[in-house]
Amino acid sequence: MRPIAALLTAVVSVAALAACGGETSTRSAPETSVAGADVTVVVDDHDYEPEHVEISAGQTVGWNFQDRMDHDVAFDDGPASPIQREGTWTRTFDEPGTYEYLCTLHPSMTGTVTVTADASPPPPTTVEDLP
């Protein structure tokens, strides 16, 4: 009788596991975009992704922190995010140039924001402006 009981237990266990395997997760991937940002950089797994971004003057970059460890975003010219694991931080870049940043807690984490001149067209000419 013992071999039959063991076989029955194995069959029931396999059936139970197979039933669990058919479930799908309803958990969605974390949101990566940052409200109000033209470009988003995700801070996760000791990395800025993407590491390099290019924007036009007047645009905003947002950093979305999604790591188990604390990080920040610090620039040579002064502004720095708070140290955080979760949350967001934004900075608007008004002047063209290359802005390098790093995590002060993990200096090997680096990134660059390249800001190009504003490419917006000149304002329309009105009849009153004509000679």
Image (cartoon, rainbow, N blue to C red):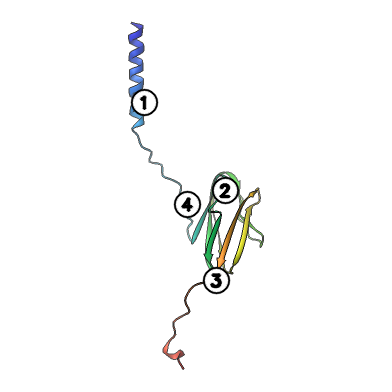
The residue tagged 1 is 17
Marks 4 and 3, the one that precedes in the sequence: 4
Which amino acid type is marked by label 3?
A: Ala
Q: Is residue 1 above or below residue 19?
A: above
The residue tagged 3 is 117
The residue tagged 4 is 32
Dot 4 and dot 1 residues touching (CB under 8 Å) = no
Marks 1 and 3, the one that precedes in the sequence: 1
Marks 1, 3: nearer the viewer: 3
Dot 1 and dot 3 residues touching (CB under 8 Å) = no
Mark 1: few/some/many CA within 10 Å (<14, 14-19, 20+): few
Q: What percent of the width, then of the height, locates residue 91? A: 56, 61
Mark 3: few/some/many CA within 10 Å (<14, 14-19, 20+): few
Q: Please give the name of the residue rendered at 54% of the width and 47% of the height, measured from the top-left corner.
A: 44
In three-dimensional space, the C-alpha distance between marks 1 and 3, rounded to whole angstroms, equals: 60 Å
The residue tagged 2 is 47
Farthest residue, direction top: 1
